[in-house]
Amino acid sequence: MIIATWNVNSVRQRIEQLLGYLRDTAPDILCLQEIKCLDEAFPRAEIEALGYNIETSGQKTFNGVAILSKYPLEDVRRGLPGNESDEQSRYIEAVVSTKSSAMRVASIYLPNGNPVDSEKYPYKLTWMAHLRRHARQLLQLEEPLVLAGDYNVIPHAQDVHDPQAWAGDALFLPQTRAAFQELLNLGLTDAFRACISAEKSYTFWDYQAVAWPKNMGIRIDHLLLSPQAADRLRCAHIDKNMRALDKPSDHVPVRIELDL
DNA sequence: ATGCCGGGCGAAGCCCGA
């Protein structure tokens, strides 16, 4: 079972790259972020033609998340419980049922939080607190669980090309990293780091100037696993080649393989 | 990189992202 996550930065701008990825890599499940369109504007037909079921939580202009799956999607939840006043579409969750098992998967677009002296940073931290509360509930089910998405969190110094340059950024502030660590401390595993210790493994490179050619990236797209999923983790991979295509997203997909 | 890209909106130039 291959599960991937990708911030596409507009699904309509990225449709050709997305279809190519689904054909070439054929993930069983793909979590998308920043689809940047309403549900009715999501390019369903071409994706369904490749054998995927689709659930979206869209929004006009900004944000928006989706789950694509070769298996049926059930018990779909949009938004975090207790956070109903949030008007931004940043969370969708579903149960994926295979012949032999069931697994819960979420697609997460965690707020950026910059600038840190604006209301955007407390919004980020509040959102993380809601996510943690919900993750704690889900973990009590003791089932395979994958919380995948753009977390907008650089977990450690080894996950950024220049830690000094990012020291005051909302993605790397100690308070941000502590909140992410609190999430992990519930019993979640960072799937990529459980498999790969290599430095300079990034999932985002700024569009501007030399970021991509000089590998000035950050690792902010993560798949967090419950113990029941982590026990079945075989490997993880960053699809870095996707950043070298024409009209790339500034993020690349991250995928894992589970023995399920 | 506190936006030199790129996307949305909408038809120029601003807002947003990380």
Image (cartoon, coloured by chain):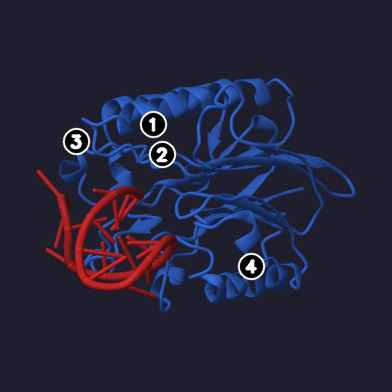
Chain colours: A blue, B red
Question: Could you tell me which residue is drawn at 28 percent across and 36 percent down?
Answer: A170
Whether discs 1 and 3 lie on one chain: the answer is: yes
Give x and y (percent) for residue A194.
51, 41
Q: Which residue is mark 2?
A: A111
> Where residue A65 sits: x, y (%)?
57, 49
Q: Chain of mark 4?
A: A
- Tell me if residue A193 comes above or below residue A246 in the rendering: above
Helix, strand or loop status at disc 4: loop
Which one is nearer the viewer's eye here, A51 or A172? A51
User: What whole-number distance in Å separates the C-alpha atoms at marks 1 and 4?
Assistant: 29 Å
Is there CB contact under 8 Å for labels 4 and 2?
no
Q: Secondary structure at mark 2?
A: loop
Bin the neighbour count of mark 1 within 10 Å (Cα to Cα): few under 14, some 14-19, many 20 and up: many
Q: Which residue is mark 1?
A: A124
Residue A118 occupies which quadrant of the picture? Answer: top left
Chain of the residue where label 3 is placed in the rendered structure:
A
Answer left or right for A168 relative to A183: left
Q: Which residue is mark 4?
A: A43
Earlier sequence position, callout 4 versus callout 2: 4
Q: Is residue A212 above or below residue A202?
A: below
**Which of the 4 image quadrants contains residue B12?**
bottom left
Tell which of A228 and A14 is nearer to you: A14
Q: Is residue A176 visible?
A: yes
Element marked by disc 3: loop
Distance, label 1 to label 3, CA atoms, is 15 Å
| Residue at 60 percent of width and 26 percent of height | A135
Residue A62 screen position, x and y as percent: 45, 51
Residue at image coords 57%, 25% = A187
